[in-house]
Image: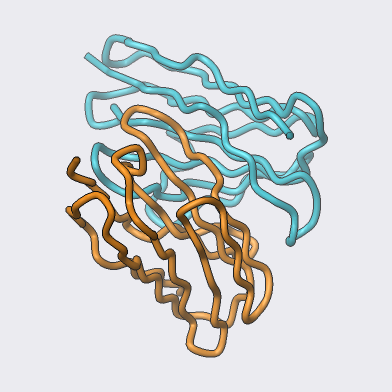
Chain colours: A cyan, B orange
Amino acid sequence: GAVVSQHPSRVICKSGTSVKIECRSLDFQATTMFWYRQFPKQSLMLMATSNEGSKATYEQGVEKDKFLINHASLTLSTLTVTSAHPEDSSFYICSARKGGAYEKLFFGSGTQLSVL
Amino acid sequence: ELKVEQNPLFLSMQEGKNYTIYCNYSTTSDRLYWYRQDPGKSLESLFVLLSNGAVKQEGRLMASLDTKARLSTLHITAAVHDLSATYFCAVDEDKIIFGKGTRLHILP
């Protein structure tokens, strides 16, 4: 089956630094990628939808200047948490869709971000 | 705004019992997914339901979709401890919105 690689799996950083998370589709071209965050024992909250070659569409309440998303190619999307603060500590998960709307969604393994 | 409501949110049950998790949603979407998540892990795809009346089964789990009622169910038959996890339904309307999840704890 299709594989989505996400890394790093875990990152600890100091408050004020920026962290970049990569999401790669290894054996297919992902026309659309989604970024989610998940707090402990809660559901996945959609942050943004990313289409290759265009600007990401952010959900209401998600700061686009804080969470920079770049989808430069059909196999790579990145999420950069800028000037991270402790409240940004969370589990971030990317997902990629192989093709059109009825195509299956594949998830990365997630990134646990801890901001000290 | 698309809303996805899942219940129960927490379920503790004995091994060998049957139970059903419900997922109600607010749109006319005919694309619904079920996922499993173990603690500290990402999501594992269980079922993809793409039409009204779709029913899929894998082992002790069976999922169905009724788009007219805007309802999907995940039925667990003769539960075993290994099925303990959090189960999410998600509705696809070009963006994927998740229910709050059902934390399933199966007692040996």
Q: Residue at x 62, y 80 (%)?
A: B53
Residue visible at 27% across and 15% down? A15
Report the quarter where the N terminus of chain B lies.
bottom left
In the depicted structure, whether residue A78 falls above or below residue B72: above
Frontmost residue, A22 versus B62: B62
Left or right: A88, with A54 as reference point? left
**Image point 59% across, 21% down: which residue?**
A22
**Residue A81 image offset from top left, x and y in percent:** 44, 26
Count of numbered tags: 0
Q: Which of A19 and B2 lies nearest the eye of the viewer?
A: B2
Q: Nearer the viewer, residue B89 or A91?
A: B89
Question: Is residue A114 positioned above or below A31 on the image?
Answer: above
Percent position of residue B2, x then y: 47, 72
In the rendering, at what x and y percent does residue A38 appear?
35, 40
Query: In the figure, is residue A22 to the left or right of B4?
Result: right
Outermost residue toward the bottom in this view: B68
Q: Position of residue A116 (x, y in %)?
A: 21, 14
Image: B47 above or below B80: below
Q: Looking at the image, which residue is at 48% across and 39% down?
A: B43
Task: Say whether residue B13 is left or right of residue A102.
Answer: left
Question: In which quadrant will I find the C terminus of chain B?
Answer: top left
